[in-house]
Image (cartoon, grey):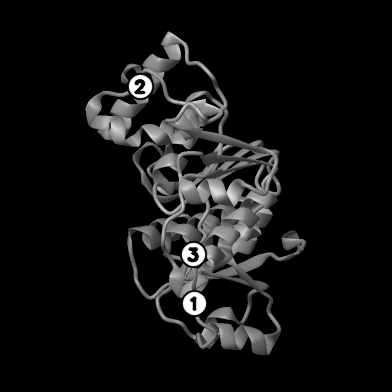
Amino acid sequence: MDFSKYKRVHCLGIGGIGLSAVAEILRDRGYIVSGTDIHPSKVTRHLEYLGIKVFTEHKPENVEDVDAIVYSAAVSDENPEVIRAKELGIPLFSRAQVLGMIMDDYEHSVAICGTHGKTTVTSMTSLILRNADYKPTILVGGNLPQINGNVEIGGTDYFVTEACEYMDSFLQLKPSIGVILNIDSDHLDYFKTMDNLVNSFSKFIGMSKKCYFNGDDELSTKAAKSVSDTVSFGFSSKNDFYAMQSEEIVNDSFSGSLPAFVAAFSSRKKLSDEEINQLQDMINKMRG
């Protein structure tokens, strides 16, 4: 799908942490962006400051002059703006679809998923690349103090995003590198069974050019079993990358987050003293 042919894009649920970031990226790319969210917030005020029109009530007339609709997972088919868009023949795209199209424009893309720790590891990975001056475009599912929000638009080579499994959203992504932190019982209202959940993660692995997974996590390992080009990380020496002498990197008060650093640094087998010092400095900044 060539999304570039659309100029006026309206976002339903624009105040959400994920869609607000997509809206900001679209605006930066030259689209005329508007949106609706019934809950005014710091996020919607920031979007308005950027020049994005935000409606606080869902009305059919909000979409009269737009070319495309992007909606969050919370928006139902009964939404009056969705109904009117269908009457007018305005195409509708999920947030995940548009995120996937955005990601396709980057040479190097990283999508980080898992039941627990997505925001933390996405933030860590983003800051590692940012501090190394790779100028990544960053999209996280929470507020990252170092970028004063949930999105930072960088260069055109590197893209790092949090990837959500709910409603198979992450299957709209084709990242250069996919990362699976863990798989636990969640979103069973949609997946129904754990087998379905694991199979969905396995599909995500298949859509990634290369996948890093937590080899200490039983279900992540199961999901990765049928895919050849994978790399495992964790604490155990059975993994391709594993933590040794972890006290050199983090002290006991921060050791619970060590798997995140193993994931973020799994492309390196050994850190230099300088890199360890830089990592400790980054931990201190994140702790603050």
Q: Amino acid at mark 1?
A: Val
In front here: 206 or 87? Answer: 206
The residue wearing badge 3 is 194
Q: If you read the primary sequence from the N terminus, does the residue marked by circle 3 or circle 2 appear first?
A: 3
- Is 99 situated above or below 239? below
The residue wearing badge 1 is 75
Taking the image as drawn, is residue 228 in sight?
yes
Q: Which of pointers 1 and 3 indicates the residue nearer the eye? A: 3
Q: What residue sits 48% from the left and 58% below the top?
A: 18
Q: What residue sits 56% from the left and 28% below the top?
A: 240
- Quadrant where the C terminus is found in the figure: top left
Q: Quadrant of residue 244?
A: top left
Q: State the separation of the CA atoms marked 1 and 3.
A: 26 Å
The residue wearing badge 2 is 246
Q: If you read the primary sequence from the N terminus, does the residue marked by circle 2 or circle 1 appear first?
A: 1
- Is 279 situated above or below 44? above
Q: Position of residue 166 (x, y in %)?
A: 50, 65
In front here: 183 or 11? Answer: 183
Q: Are marks 1 and 3 in contact (CB under 8 Å)?
A: no
